[in-house]
Amino acid sequence: MRPISVLNVGSKDITNINRRVLEIPEERFQFASDGRMALDILANSERLPDLIIISNFEMPVINGRALYQRIKTDERYSEIPILITHDVEDDYKEVLKHNGVYYLTKPYETSKFKKLVNDIVR
């Protein structure tokens, strides 16, 4: 996998697990507890070209759907790939893929998660 930075939005525990699975150094892995915090981090970030966002779907303040809609309609961030995780397999996941948003149903196997992230960042 090429060097990337990750913004993980959702649970701090899941963020730590994802970082270990992806084998990414801690300094290249940021955490946001909700979509509002993620947007604030993006606004203050300088490393956007190598960034991927991994976001839970259900979150307080700004949920995963609202977060990806805001990111994909903002020209500064629209090219950032987003991986949404959710515990329900929704019908719109195929539509998301065509907009640079990928979808993974929880619980997921770590090998499947790692392969999907590798495929996204290639």
Image (spheres, rainbow, N blue to C red):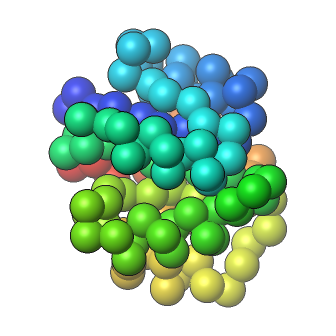
**In-image side of 6 versus 79 (left or right):** right
Work out whether residue 37 or residue 50 is closer to the camera in this orientation and state it.
37
- Give the residue displayed 68% in from the left and 47% down from the top: 34
Image spot of residue 43 (x, y percent): 38, 46
- Give the residue displayed 34% in from the left and 70% down from the top: 74
Position of residue 70 relative to residue 46, above or below, is below
Position of residue 86 relative to residue 99, above or below, is above
Q: Quadrant of the N terminus?
A: top left
- Give the residue displayed 46% in from the left and 39% down from the top: 41
Does the image show residue 43?
Answer: yes
Does the image show residue 118?
Answer: no
Position of residue 18 relative to residue 80, above or below, is above
- Give the residue displayed 26% in from the left and 70% down from the top: 75
Q: In the rendered picture of this protein, how many numbered marks are placed on residues? A: 0
Position of residue 45 relative to residue 76, above or below, is above
Image spot of residue 64 (x, y percent): 64, 62
Work out whether residue 108 or residue 10 is closer to the camera in this orientation and state it.
10
Q: Residue furthest top?
A: 26
Image spot of residue 111 (x, y percent): 54, 37
Work out whether residue 17 or residue 77 is closer to the camera in this orientation and state it.
77
**In-image side of 63 versus 29 (left or right):** right
Image spot of residue 55 (x, y percent): 59, 50
